[in-house]
């Protein structure tokens, strides 16, 4: 008899564990399972409405008490507030006698053309009493251009400065190695590097071409400037300047380094 009872309890616990594992971590999206999402949403809405208490907010734009939290939750996560491009989903998980429902609901800003995700993490006990509430504002993104690669960040600016400095240094060292004792070749090489780097960045951020196209434009500009300097300006001022193909080569070499370092060595 004891063995039968023990076996029954093991089977019962196994079924409960299997049911818990099946349920835990479910993701319910409103557009796919509207009825189930609405059921959970209205349950949480009721819990927030009947619970009194202050909240710890990390931003002035987030609720300060459960009444404001209820109003905000209704505004952002209610099915009636949804648009076709605003996602809403809830993840359900369990830990002992506690149930956690994590809502992630998109909202559109009233004054800017951006969409941000609001996260409501609601933990309740077995009697559906509120035990913990967390409200987070996740990253905002532009609706028309959610990930513009041509937008320069502070990190990009730092990487660009390092890339330009590195390309200028390498260009100068190469010129000193190749053209020993010729100081003007050093100046041509570093000048070509700066011209190519600046043109690459201008093409990428200003004209929004691809990175490869920007690098080609940068290098081509440095070559064009080198040839124009020697065969247009210097050729017409032979009394003070000398036409030297090696000057053009040094400038072009620096241009190659400038375009290469900015394009390949650092992310921007």
Image: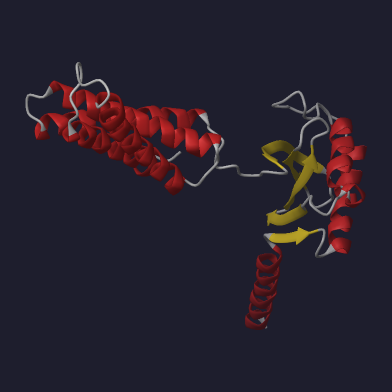
Quarter of the picture containing the N terminus is bottom right
The x and y percentages for residue 151 are 56, 35
Query: Residue 183 vs residue 225: left or right?
Result: left
Instruction: Report the front residue among 41 and 88.
Output: 88
User: What is the basis of the colouring in this image?
Assistant: secondary structure
Tell me the residue at 17%/31% (across/down). Answer: 244
Query: Residue 119 vs residue 54: left or right?
Result: left
Tell me the residue at 55%/38% (across/down). Answer: 207
Query: Residue 217 vs residue 117: left or right?
Result: left
Q: Residue furthest left?
A: 181
Q: Is residue 27 above or below residue 123?
A: below
Q: Where is residue 171, by image quadrant?
A: top left
The x and y percentages for residue 195 are 36, 29
Can residue 166 be seen?
Answer: no
Q: Where is residue 96, by image quadrant?
A: bottom right
The x and y percentages for residue 219 are 35, 40
Tell me the residue at 86%/50% (across/down). Answer: 82
Can residue 196 be seen?
Answer: yes
Q: How many discs appear? A: 0
Tell me the residue at 85%/55% (across/down). Answer: 40
The x and y percentages for residue 189 are 23, 30
Instruction: Report the front residue among 4 and 10.
Output: 10
Q: Residue furthest top?
A: 240
Instruction: Report the front residue among 171 and 8.
Output: 171
Q: Where is residue 33, by image quadrant?
A: bottom right
Q: Is residue 54 above or below residue 117?
A: above
């Amino acid at each position: 008899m004891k063995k039968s009872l023990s076996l029954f309890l093991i089977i019962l616990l196994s079924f409960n564990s299997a049911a818990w594992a099946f349920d835990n971590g479910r993701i319910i999206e409103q557009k796919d399972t509207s009825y189930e999402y609405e059921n959970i949403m209205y349950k949480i809405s009721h819990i927030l409405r009947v619970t009194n208490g202050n909240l710890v907010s990390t931003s002035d734009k987030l609720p300060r008490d459960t009444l404001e939290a209820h109003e905000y939750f209704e505004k952002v996560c209610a099915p009636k507030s949804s648009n076709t491009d605003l996602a809403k989903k809830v993840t359900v998980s369990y830990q002992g006698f506690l149930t956690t429902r994590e809502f992630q609901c998109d909202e559109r800003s009233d004054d800017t053309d951006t969409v941000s995700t609001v996260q409501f993490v609601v933990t309740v006990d077995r009697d559906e009493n509120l035990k913990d509430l967390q409200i987070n504002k996740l990253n905002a993104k532009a609706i028309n251009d959610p990930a513009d690669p041509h937008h320069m960040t502070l990190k990009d600016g730092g990487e660009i400065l390092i890339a330009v400095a590195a390309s200028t240094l390498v260009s100068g060292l190469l010129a000193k190695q190749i053209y020993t004792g010729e100081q003007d070749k050093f100046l041509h090489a570093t000048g070509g590097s700066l011209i190519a780097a600046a043109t690459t960045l201008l093409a990428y951020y200003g004209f929004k071409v691809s990175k490869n196209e920007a690098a080609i434009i940068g290098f081509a500009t440095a070559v064009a400037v080198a040839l124009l300097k020697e065969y247009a300006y210097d050729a017409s001022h032979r009394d003070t300047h000398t036409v030297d193909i090696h000057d053009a080569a040094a400038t072009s070499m620096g241009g190659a380094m400038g375009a290469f370092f900015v394009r390949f060595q650092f992310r921007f």
